[in-house]
Image (tube, rainbow, N blue to C red):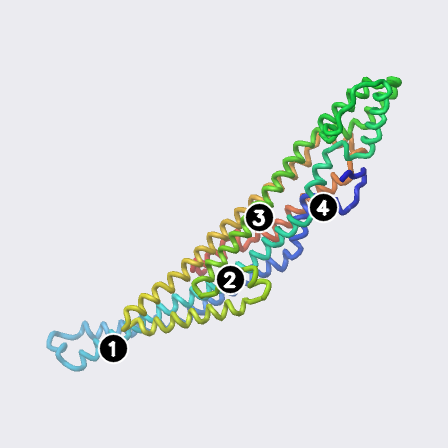
Amino acid sequence: MIFNQHFPKKGLALVCLILISCSAYSITDSLDFERITEELKFGTNSLLNKYQSEIMAFGEDLTLLNRKLYALDENDFSKKESFQILLSKMKIQEELALKKRTLQFKLNKARYRKGLDLIKIMYEKILGLDHHFHTLQTYQNILELSNPNSYPDFQQKNEAIHQRLKKKNIFQLPTLLQNNPYLSATFSIVGSMLSGGEIEEKEKDLNDIACILDFTVQMHSDFNLIYYETSFLKESNTNLKEECIRLFKDYCKIIDYNMTLDNCREEDDWETVFERLDLYIETLETAALESMEDPNAQKSLTKGIANLEFSIHRLLDFLDQYCLFITQGERYYQKFEVIVANYQNEEHCATQLPHQFDILKRDISLSIEKFDEAYNLSELKGSKLKDLLFGQVE
């Protein structure tokens, strides 16, 4: 659609409004990440404090029993009291092993639980980008910004030149080629020279459209670059969304939750997910109690803990993928900022350039800031959250 020199503001969004719009909840998003980090840290420390104090108490009991055993001579081992000391040691060792396994899968439960919160938040962010990439009509506008045929002043002068050429029966540019900005610009210059009229009139025609021609020709390839690289980001975001959906499916498979991420989100079925996790942990607790005498229970416990840890590592891999995409996207927009800041004749042509060009530059700068605040959060960049998910506590 052709825009005039002051085309409607709904077209001003261009590429950057995509990111500005979906960054509206940056403060909330940041708080969500901070909440997850602090809750996971608090929960982890609480579990460690509770179980480590009990584990230390068992350790002290074992030390005391070992001292008693070391103090015995060969004749003492045949006595009933010595046998009781050995039984007590074996019982404490079993209870200590059980306590350590219980701590392990409860820590994994806390990490797994917060991993679900992370997937939920990340998916909302990805959907925000995806929604705006698909609904805002920005791509055509940015290409029109570098097409001289979109400018009324150029259209008027070009039409006048065409009319003079018709009168002289000089070759006309085919309609198909008129949409090509380079050919259209070249034909206008050549046509102005060949058309009738006084030299002063021809010079005035060229002077009136000189800035439009210079701006559109110089910036055409740059705006094409922004257009196609934004399309690439759009496709990358789509791929990231699909990967997040697969992650949720694999992540919840071990707790026997089979609803898709989209359906879970639409039906707000997160409580069911958490209930399935609780049931899974209860199964592990039962296996832990039975593992002392039942090898199959020990095998089930080991497999259950491994499944939790594998799912958490799968989530960490996705976080790395997400951070890479966000970093890449921010760098792209930083490059766009350099591109639009380097039109050489901007000062000379300031009065004839569309005011949307200034808005575009301002929006790109704001987009970078908003993009960083909403998506490239310090909680991920500083790896504090990742450390907690790995089990490393300050």
Give the alpha-carbon distance from disc 3 to disc 1, as whole Å: 60 Å
Report the front residue among 300 and 169: 169
Circle 1 residues within 10 Å: few <14, some 14–19, many ≥20: some
Write down the residue under mark 4: 13
Tell me the CA gap for discs 2 and 1: 42 Å
What residue sits right under mark 2 in the picture?
A: 116
**Disc 4, SS:** loop
Is residue 245 toward the left or the right of residue 224 in the image?
left
Callout 4 touching callout 1 (CB < 8 Å): no
The reply to whether callout 2 and callout 1 are in contact (CB within 8 Å) is: no
* Circle 4 residues within 10 Å: few <14, some 14–19, many ≥20: many
Q: Which residue does the numbered mark 1 point to in the structure image?
A: 88
User: Which residue lies at the image location 76% right of the left edge and 47% below the top edge?
Assistant: 10
Q: Given this view, does label 4 or label 1 mark the residue nearer the observer?
A: 4
**Quadrant of image for the N terminus:** top right
Q: At 78% from the left edge and 29% from the top edge, which residue is drawn?
A: 211
Q: What residue did someone put label 3 on?
A: 237
Residue extending farthest to the left is: 75
Residues at marks 4 and 2, CA–CA distance in whole angstroms:
34 Å
What amino acid does circle 4 point to?
Ala
Residue 120 sits in which quadrant? bottom right
Q: Amino acid at mark 3?
A: Asn
